[in-house]
Image (spheres, grey):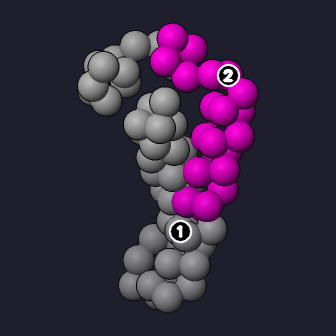
Amino acid sequence: MSLRAKLGRRPDEWNSAGRLQWVVPSGAGLGGVAGALLALAVQPWSLPGGALAGLGAGSGAALAVVLAAALD
């Protein structure tokens, strides 16, 4: 099954619930940290730090779902 087909289905059909319980929050946490660190460097010229950390957390969680589907 291709990655695109897996992502089109419900997550419990292609992935174990145990894996999703730690992969998605971990990805969100790492993305939030990356966004916060990026905010330290570009905050005077860009969005506030909280906004960049939130964007990082959201993109990290989305990337973690794709990674979990690819590993399954």
Q: Position of residue 62 (x, y in %)?
A: 46, 42
Given this view, does label 1 or label 2 mark the residue nearer the observer?
Answer: 2
Q: What residue sits 39% from the left and 84% below the top?
A: 45
Check disc 1 and give the amino acid type.
Answer: Gly
Q: Is residue 40 magenta?
A: no
Disc 1 target residue: 35
Q: What residue sits 64% from the left and 31% below the top?
A: 20
Check disc 2 and give the amino acid type.
Answer: Ala
Q: Is residue 36 above or below residue 67?
A: below
| Nearer to the camera, 64 or 32 | 64
| Nearer to the camera, 45 or 34 | 34
Q: What residue sits 51% from the left and 52% below the top?
A: 60
Mark closest to the chain's N terminus, 1 or 2: 2
Disc 2 target residue: 17
Q: Residues within 10 Å of mark 2 (few under 14, many from 20)?
A: few
- Give the magenta-colored segment's residue range: 12-32
Classify residue 29 by image quadrant: bottom right
Q: Position of residue 71 (x, y in %)?
A: 47, 38
Q: Determine the main secondary structure of the stretch shown in magenta.
A: helix
Q: Is residue 69 above or below residue 43?
A: above
Q: Position of residue 64 (x, y in %)?
A: 51, 44
